[in-house]
Amino acid sequence: MSDTSVLILSGGLDSTTLLYDLINQRKIVHAISFHYGQRHSKELVCARETCEKLGVNHKIVDLSGLSEILKSSLTTPDIEVPEGHYSDENMAITVVPGRNTIFLSIAAGYAASINADAVYLGNHSGDHAIYSDCRPEYIEAMRKVLQLFDNKIINLYTPYLNIDKTEILTRGLALDVDYSLTWTCYQGRNKACGKCGSCTERFEAFELNNATDPIEYEE
Ligand SMILES: [Zn+2]
C-alpha cells in the first residue's frame, strides 16, 4: 500500500471535513475538484483556500463544458434552484446527471497516474433519497469498477456513507475544521441564501450541534 489517496473535494462541508479527517489519520492526500459549470463555483475558491491552508496538493479540473449538456438547476442558469428541505420532491431538479460517475472516473485516473491506491468520496446518508449516485448500491458497484479500472487496484472509500451531515459536523468540530472556508449553498450569490435544500441541511446540522455557522447568510 502506498497510503497515498485522492480525495474528491467539492469545497462543501462534507468533503472538507473528510480532508481534515484523513490528514488527522496521517494519510497523504491529493485533493481534486471539478468545475462543471456549477452556479455555486464559489465552493471551488473555498476548496483552494482550504488546501492552501493545510498545505495539500490540489487540482481543479475544468469540465465547465458539461453545463451545456447536463440539465440540472445547478448548471442550467434558467432552471431555478428550489427552496426547502431535501425531502421535498422538487429537489430532484438539483440532480446533476452522472456527476459522481464522471468525477470518480477522473479521480481514479488521477490516482492511477500518481501511484495512489485509494479514492475518497464524502457522500453521506442524507444524500441517498435524492441522489442515486450517492446510494450504497451505487457505491458498491463503483467500488468494483475502480478495482478493475487499471492494472493496479484503486480502492474506493466512502467513510461517511452511513452517517448524516449532523454527525459529520460533530466529527469536524472535534477536528477543528475551518468551516468559514466551506460553501454549501446551491445559489451562486455572494452570501448563502439560507433557503435552498443544501443551506437548510447545513443550518440544521449546526443547530443540532449547538454550534454557530461562521459563514454569512442573506437577510
Ligand atoms: Zn442556499
Image (cartoon, rainbow, N blue to C red):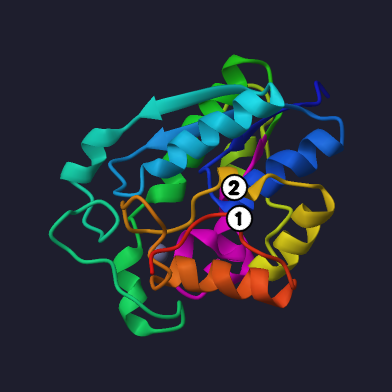
The residue sitting at 71% across, 61% down in the picture is 169
**Circle 2 sits in a helix, a strand or a loop, which is it?**
helix
Q: Quadrant of residue 53?
A: top right
Q: Residues within 10 Å of mark 2 (few under 14, many from 20)?
A: few
Quadrant of the displayed image that contains ligand 1: bottom left
The picture places residue 189, in percent across and down from the top left corner, at: 31, 53
Q: Which residues are magenta?
A: 119-143
> Left of 109 or right of it: where is 66?
left
Query: Looking at numbered disc 1 in the image, what kind of residue is underneath it?
Result: Pro
Q: Which residue is mark 1?
A: 214
Q: For this rendering, which residue is in front, 72 or 77?
A: 77
Q: CA distance from mark 1 to mark 2?
A: 5 Å
| Label 1 with label 2: CB-CB less than 8 Å | yes
**Circle 1 sits in a helix, a strand or a loop, which is it?**
loop
Question: Is residue 140 highlighted in magenta?
Answer: yes
Q: Quadrant of residue 136?
A: bottom right
Vertical comparison of 217 with 41: above or below:
below
Considering only order in the chain, which callout, 2 or 1, is on the residue closer to the N terminus?
2
Q: Which residue is mark 2?
A: 180
Number of labels in the image equals 2
Q: Is residue 30 visible?
A: no
Q: Which residue of the protein is positioned furthest toward the front in this rendering?
A: 219
The residue sitting at 84% across, 54% down in the picture is 174
The residue sitting at 39% across, 55% down in the picture is 191
Q: For this rendering, which residue is in front, 60 or 135?
A: 60
Identify the image quadrant of the C terminus.
bottom left
> Left of 50 or right of it: where is 25?
right
